[in-house]
Image (tube, grey):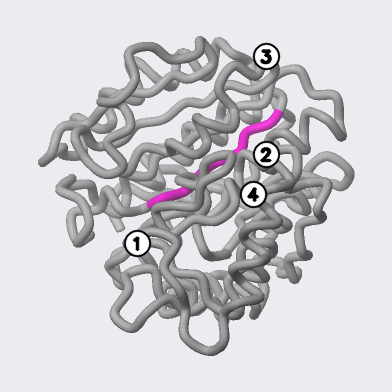
Amino acid sequence: MRNRKCSGTMSAADKLLVLSHPDCLAHQPVAGHPESPARLQTVLQALQALPELSWRQAPLASRAQLLRAHPADYLAALEQYQAAVAEQPIALDPDTWLGPASLAAARRAAGAVCAGIEQVMQTSVRRVFCAVRPPGHHAERARAMGFCFYSTVAVGALYAVDQYALQRVAVVDFDVHQGNGSEDVLGGHANIHYFASHQVPLYPFADQQVKSRPDNLTYRGLPAGCDSATFRRLWSEQLLPRLDNYQPELLLVSAGFDAHQADPLAQCNLHTDDFGWLTEKLVRIAVRHARGRIVSSLEGGYDLAALAASVVSHAQALQGIHYA
């Protein structure tokens, strides 16, 4: 790991809380699917090797929490599909497979983000990582897609605004794929701003289908083959200053690690330390404006070794280990 230095003795506020649940391992798409239980198993094993973490089980998201992001008829339709599943998963689209345990896993993922928000708002905990699956940032208001059923981080952002009367919640998304679901759910919200980078062109190709976007959605495209210098320059010069100027009271992170050079589903060339570098910048902004409060949730990342190393880089930066 390059250019890493420890900031000194870890304070209580810097210690990282990890939220997860065995239900997230039970979601099983078809054999050979890239979004497999092995992803989370690898992440959990990597995190368990780190010192000074605390662990809690993720609760199920409540229906009220899900309804902030998704209409009741969409939730009912998913539940009807779930009831019809016997042993083999069914395809909601070519990429998104619903099995007997899928909705429980997705509810744990959304519930983890909401529980993480409760922790940073009500206790001395300042940083939370939700080690969960399936991912969520492709799930639109009434459409499951891209491996996602519920718009996990968007559910949390809406919960934070409603429950804690926050005026400025930032959602930061560095997954290599555009978070079209987060944009669909959060677009136009007066108290939430979405900041993101993603490869262009790449699935879900949503940026090519709309001519204009609400003012609270700020994203920048990365070219195929994007390297560390390009990624860091884009965030340093364009996205981080805007995020800092927004002065968020809470940061939520859609933490996708599929821009890594080893990932099979994209064509970017980032290194493990790039994720630690960006996370450290987010921590500094959170300390300045949000009392250090960050809740991060796992999104993409499909090469197991790269995913494990990148999550460790992210987690260590959340703990206060800095990257040059």
- Residue 19 in sight: no
Which amino acid type is marked by label 1? Asp
Local secondary structure at mark 1:
loop
Where 189 sits versus 262, above or below?
above
In this picture, which residue range is highlighted in magenta? 250-256
Which amino acid type is marked by label 4? Tyr
Q: Which mark is residue 190?
A: 3
Q: Residues within 10 Å of mark 4 (few under 14, many from 20)?
A: some
What's the CA distance linking mark 4 and mark 2? 10 Å
Q: Which mark is residue 285?
A: none
Q: Which mark is residue 95?
A: 1
Pick the front one: 288 or 135: 135
Pick the front one: 293 or 19: 19
Q: Mostly what secondary structure, the magenta segment?
A: strand
What's the CA distance linking mark 2 and mark 1? 22 Å
Q: Position of residue 153 (x, y in %)?
A: 60, 44
Looking at the rendering, in which quadrant would you find the N terminus? bottom left
What's the CA distance linking mark 1 and mark 4? 18 Å
Q: Position of residue 26 (x, y in %)?
A: 57, 81
Where 189 sits versus 12, above or below?
above
The residue sitting at the bottom extreme is: 87
Is residue 285 found left or right of 212 in the rendered image? right
Q: Which residue is mark 4?
A: 74
Local secondary structure at mark 2:
loop
Are circles 2 and 1 on residues that touch, CB within 8 Å?
no
Q: How many marks?
A: 4
Q: Position of residue 79 (x, y in %)?
A: 67, 65
Q: Residue at 68% x, 62% y: name it.
A: 107
Where 196 sits versus 39, above or below?
above
Q: Tell me which label, 2 or 3, sits earlier in the chain.
A: 2
Q: Tell me which label, 2 or 1, sits earlier in the chain.
A: 2
